[in-house]
Image: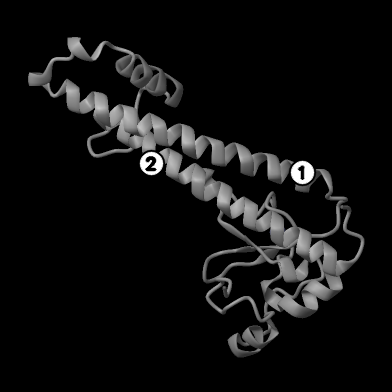
Amino acid sequence: MIATTTAARIAHDEATAAAFAELSKWTGYRNGLVKGLHRDLGHQPTVRYGSTYRQSVEDTLAEAEAFVARDEATLDRAKGEAMTYHRLNDTLALWAKYGAKVEELTLALAALDAEYTGWTRAFLVTNSNGHVHSSMNCSTCNRNGKATTFAWVTDFSDHDEAQIVAAAGWRACTVCYPTAPVVGMTAKAAKAALPSTIKNDGSIKA
Ligand SMILES: [Zn+2]
């Protein structure tokens, strides 16, 4: 259903933010599985104790699948292949299970996105000095090849610049909201200006 009121738009964005968080959780679990596959297949990280590998995720999965496709009778138990075989099987089963979750959430997000008609949204950078931005693509974020971590501030969905600047004060990004004050607010005043869901360290209250 297309949301036409601010309350409905906030609810829509809350659902989107929740699906977004779930998706990154399950994607994270999958990344953890890949790490296990590298280890079980005897891959060496490119740097000692590092976490990057020469083998791509696709190649690693293909190698694991080829391993478990082997006839169990031909496994070299002395080399620990039977153990590897079972570990890889377990990991691949989890990979498929988590993948179904990722797919389900991706579809849910696509459905929500299809009903998004472009109302304003706000995102808070989750660090102690975090600012509120109108999108996750703000030019002041994601610098030096590092992805910025954002929290959705759904309280601010479908609110205009004046409303956001009034509520967020210096925390409103001056690129996203040109009328935002740069400085001139004490920490106490800034804290008082924050909406109830944002704590002063930039995190969001549950
Ligand atoms: Zn910004």
Q: Given the image, on which type of amino acid does mark 2 rest?
A: Gly
Where is residue 20? Give x, y as percent.
Answer: 62, 51
Location of residue 17 with respect to 67 vertically, above or below: below
Which residue is tagged 1? 111
What's the distance in space between the residues labelled 1 and 2, CA to CA? 28 Å
Q: Given the image, on which type of amino acid does mark 1 rest?
A: Ala
Within the image, what quadrant is residue 16 found in? bottom right
Of 45 and 169, the residue lying toward us: 45
Q: Callout 2: few (<14), some (14-19), or many (20+) C-alpha neighbours within 10 Å?
A: few
Q: Residue at x 38, y 23 (%)?
A: 60
Secondary element type, mark 2 = helix
Sequence order check: which comes first, mark 1 or mark 2?
Answer: 2
Which label sits in the foreground, 1 or 2? 1
Which residue is tagged 2? 32
Location of residue 6 with respect to 49 vertically, above or below: below
Within the image, what quadrant is residue 133 found in? bottom right
Q: Callout 1: few (<14), some (14-19), or many (20+) C-alpha neighbours within 10 Å?
A: few
Specify whether residue 46 is in view: no
Q: Quadrant of the C terminus?
A: bottom right
Q: Residue furthest left?
A: 78
Secondary element type, mark 1 = helix
Within the image, what quadrant is residue 37 found in? top left
Where is residue 95? Give x, y as percent.
Answer: 44, 34
